[in-house]
Amino acid sequence: LSSAKHAKVGQLLAQLKAAKKLLGTVLGAKGKDALLWPAKVQIVLLRSEQQFQQFAEVVDQVDYAKNPESGYTKEDHTAIWQPDSTAALRIMATDAVKYIHGTDRQTGWWLSEGVAELVIGMLKSKSGKDARDKAYFLRNYKTTADVLSAENNEDNIYYLLEAQEIKRRQERRSRAMAMTLVDFLYRTRKVPRFLSNLKSPEAPAAPPEDDADASKTYWLSYVNFQEKALKTHFGKETEKLDLLWKRHVLEMAKKYSSAADQRARYPNVRGRNRND
């Protein structure tokens, strides 16, 4: 947009400001001097969906620009056409996890994507414009509960902790699982110290991307370091955390489903189940 006074710009800035505040709380980086990003996050906000698609095809050669997030990220910029696009919130959150504490130590995809989903869900639950927005947490918890309850399911906490990359063909499901695990850990209020440990000088340093053998060795050492950090800060072996997380997911899925059913049954009763 050419004008900083355009209504869309104001809406986007308000959304990003709210996201930054939530990120500071989740990551334990509060205050005016808290460092979350080393540089500016570049966001291209287009006036309409048509302009957005033209920009995607001509500038970025993105074939499938029309997606549920109303935006996409390519290289060093994120293009959106809706001020409340989750694409902008996602890159803001994942970059915050990547650069916090100003170190080059990496973290697993589950942590950055889980934090992003958690912040997006918090914002939508608080200021979402429709019932679908309000049900963001419910959908993620229900998706995860369905996965963990399925027969012959092989996805568990070890998949999240040990997979070096997110499953692109199962992105929505993987993000839902990551969010519920981060939410489970966040409720203990120990995520900031856990993240600080993963970013400390004691954590394994990633090798150059073009060194395949070193990358495999690094990842094995990182997974081991991450598991020890989990035990240190959450006081449980990974197997026990897996059981507690699964129980938490099933309980929360049931709770959110019950709350959604009551809101649907009594749509005009204000204040009902406010704690949900």
Image (cartoon, rainbow, N blue to C red):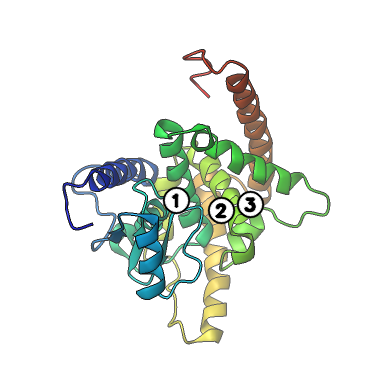
- Residue at 52 percent across and 83 percent down: it is 214
Q: Quadrant of residue 47?
A: bottom left
Label 2 and label 1: CA atoms lie apart by 9 Å
Residue holding disc 2:
175
Q: Quadrant of residue 140?
A: top right
Residue holding disc 3:
238
Q: Callout 1: 10 Å neighbours few (<14), some, many (20+)?
A: many
List x then y, in percent, for residue 59: 35, 74
Q: Is residue 240 visible?
A: no
Asked whether disc 2 touches disc 1, contact meaning CB atoms under 8 Å apart, the reply is yes
The front one of 137 and 65 is 65
Q: Earlier in the sequence, mark 2 or mark 1?
A: 1
Q: Earlier in the sequence, mark 2 or mark 3?
A: 2
Locate residue 4 relative to residue 17 in the image: left or right.
left
Locate residue 244 relative to residue 78 in the image: left or right.
right
Label 2 and label 3: CA atoms lie apart by 20 Å
Asked whether disc 1 touches disc 3, contact meaning CB atoms under 8 Å apart, the reply is no
- Residue at 34 percent across and 47 percent down: it is 83
The front one of 139 and 57 is 57
Residue holding disc 1:
116
The local secondary structure at tag 2 comes to helix
The local secondary structure at tag 1 comes to helix
